[in-house]
Image (tube, rainbow, N blue to C red):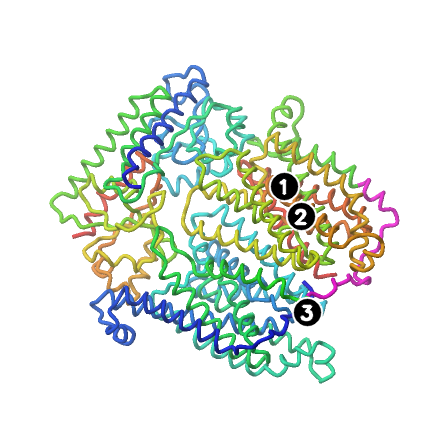
Amino acid sequence: MPKMTGAVDRRRFLQAAAALPLGLLAGGAWSAEPGVDGGVCALDWTSAQALLSLGIVPHGLPEIDRYRRSVIEPAVPDGVPDIGARAEPNLELLDRLAPARFVTDGMLSAVRGRLERIAPLTLYQSFDTGSVDGDRGSGQLAFAIASLRGLADGLGVPDAADRAAARLDHALEEARARLSGRERRPLYILSVLDGRRVLIHGRNSLYQDLLDRLEIENAWTGPSGPYGHATVTMDRLTGRPDAGLVNIGSEGKRALEALADLPLFAGLPFLREGRVTILPPILFYGGVPTAERFVRLLGERLPQRHG
Amino acid sequence: MADTAIPTPSRRFGPAWPVTGLFLLAGLASFLVLGRQLPPELWWRALVDPDPARLDQLAAHYVLFPRFAVALLVGAALGLAGTILQQVLRNPLAEPATLGISAGAHLSLAVATLWIPEALALGREWVALAGAGLSAAALLALSWRKGLSPVTVVLAGLVLSLYAGSVSGVMVLFNHDLLIGLFLWGAGFLDQQDWGMAAFLAPRLAVLAVAAALVLRPLVLLGLGEGGARSLGLSVVGARLAGLLIAVMLTALTVAAVGVVSFVGLAAPTIVGMAGARRLGQRMLWAPLCGAALLWATDALVLMAPITYRELPTGAVTAVLGVPMLLWLLPRLRTSAPPVLSAAAQPPRASRPALVLAGAALLLPLALWMAVAFGSGPDGWGWSSGDDLAALGPWRLPRALAALSGGAMLAVAGAMLQRMTGNPLAAPEILGVSSGAILGVIVLMFSADAPERGAQIAAGGAGAVAVLAAMLALGRKDGFSPDRLLLAGIATSSISGVVVAVLMAGQDPRLQTLVTWLSGSTYMVGWTDGLAAVLLAMLAIGAIPFVARWLDLLPLGGGVAAALGVSPSLSRIALFSLSALLTAAATLIVGPLSFVGLMGPHLARMLGLQRAAAHLAGSAMLGGLIMLMADWLGRSVIFPYQVPAGLLASVIGGPFLLWLLGRR
């Protein structure tokens, strides 16, 4: 299987990429001026992130309040209409908003036909679920950048994607500078789920590529699923005594403190020696904007904690 | 779900044999698991005095050994609880989960997580216990008037757990990120991080075991039947209540500790009973041992499973193992004649059922017009007409039609099932075909890239038909005894529940749309399926005159029906298949969840529609109206967000339904 992955990835990516111009042709002429001419509506959070990072204010996006709490960046300006739940954006409202185009990650395929009656769809997939765990380097970053470029080209703002990619490069450089001269410990990148179990990011996650760029080793080399993560109990994190721990999501702090009080985890070096970094929430699958946020936050907060 | 009893096994092996065998299996698997972590000479050291500097010893001491201990304790508690429940309810299929205790505990945890997190600081155990206690109290209140009759208790428990499940469903739908930990907990993971849980369980279970021993004698007398027990001077209600209380507390403790572990409470007493433990005293000794060995063995096997990106909850594994056992047990159960609804409990018969039906029929177009024309939008509530209405119609009308038709189909299916089984709680939800549809859609979702609506319907339909065929094959042996078909349906339903729980635990973003569909949303309905639903509902209503005679005659008993020229088994196949097909179609259109299959028929009865034809037609109209209103409300109350119609119908209609059933 692993031998096939290159071909599979490429094929899947080409499929996704090929869908972009097709959708665009159906929509007729597209203004080079972003955010005008009826606007672009994001049907999910990763699409909203992508549009905002391209400098386009979406004409509608789902669950805005929760976006502001859980995704945070890029910030949504006031006045953007809330189109309802991510699983069920309100079709009646979408029809009334009459955007010139939808951007979707493809999760709403069941209502595709009815969405297309309102406006043409552009498929934007920022995460490659076909990448197979076990590769060296996940390829997720390249996939995300190519995907964002495809979106920007289709929307007539190719330069915006270059700028977004440049911002990411800049964030990477800055983080590297902040981390330079320090001992690079391997890191577990995880989110505490319920006090016993964590969601941990593996070799086919976006974070793997970012850690590679920062020359930091991912301490989790165990299995991970199609979305780049695995659900494991904390006691599985005993393999790398020298590692540090990065928890994504502020609410994990209390759970980790409670865990550190247990005799079992008091023995885990990263808890015992306080090598724990808490990052605010980051959307796991969000591509370039997610990468930029993660790298910047890691660069800011890691040096405070890790020796 | 009449009185049923395990036939006397022809050859007795003695209960010690299966229990010893299970313990050997569990021990062997545990040795292998331990051996992967530590060399055998260090096991003792790791158990009693681990080297704090050695992570492998610490992990054995704080993870593996306590996990074995918790598996043993929980298994024993469930075995004991199952034995007591089976004795008290005189029903060999009774087990802790069917009482709705676990669902109640799950719900209380969700409520506490969202709204009163301070309560969780006291300990999840206490919060869960409160919920378990409340749902047990509701169960007792519901079945009290019937003198805690076994059938009523089991069915009330089932309805309660469906209800608690749907309330948790709403909360998860809108707070998925906050409650994901709860999904993990609900799936029945046994893993431990210290000895705390074992230390919590052991003394409490010991106290309850002593209490159980104290009520042994009254429980034995209960086994003589109500008349026999009463003539020996026993308070039947008091003895049942004491037994139920102990079993409920045992269940609540295990649920609070590890979540839902189903079927151990069913399997343990059954295994020792089949092996020859006949007297209650024997069973109360051996069943806990058997339960302990069973859960330990299952858990050790789970531990031996290869490591992947998602963990396998032991509770889900026991449920899957339990299904074939339940299906194997079914043909071996003796069922008695279907219970006849007591005449006194029936509401008065309407003098002019035709007038009632005509009134309901008049309401339909009015309601449909309101559901489409009146609603909330970005500018608030309002009526729309003219161009506005023409613009909104294509979005609202298909959903309204689908809700109306789906509700009608479910209500007709429910009314047929209830009349056929003589069982007021026979809901189409527990038929198992919905479960087949869910599994079909899940398989498609995880094998195809971006399935469209048509493919989803085809996959769901295939799953439902497969389950229907399996159930018909299963029921052929015993002339399609309705009780057994219902029970087999419950077993099948539990499979899809487990699959969904395991997927949820794996954190897959694709599940979001699945969750909304599972909670009964008409969101995905377009013109094609909306009109197809109308057509199917018309066919269902058109079939009423053809099945009405069967439904009037079958409750009189197979003999009477046959004498009047109705073949009991043929008519049962036809009725069962028809209700299954209607349920499957409705599931695909409006999702598998709603109590409309119970509410429609019961409301129709309350309005005095007693004869089968009028009852079915009335059920169809009322069921349709309920779903239509639920869909309209769900689309409007929190615009632009939407509450799935099935969920809304259950949450609002559920308490009313429970009140209605408790009153009867």
Q: Nearer the viewer, residue A279 or B258?
A: B258
Crowding near pointer 2: few (<14 within 10 Å), some, many (20+)?
many
Give the residue type that dot 1 points to: Ala
Q: Looking at the figure, which quarter contains the C terminus of chain B?
A: bottom right
Q: Earlier in the sequence, mark 3 or mark 1?
A: 3
Q: Of helix, strand and loop, which one carries label 2? A: helix
| Chain letter of the residue beneath label 3 in the structure image | B
Establish whether labels 3 and 2 are both on one chain.
yes
Q: Nearer the viewer, residue B54 or A91?
A: B54
Q: Which residue is mark 3?
A: B148
Give the residue type that dot 3 points to: Leu
Q: Which residues are magenta?
A: B335-359
Q: Earlier in the sequence, mark 3 or mark 2?
A: 3
Q: Which residue is mark 1?
A: B585
State the image coordinates of residue A205 (x, y, percent, origin top left).
30, 42
Front of the two marks 3 and 1: 1
**Residue A296 in view, yes or no:** no
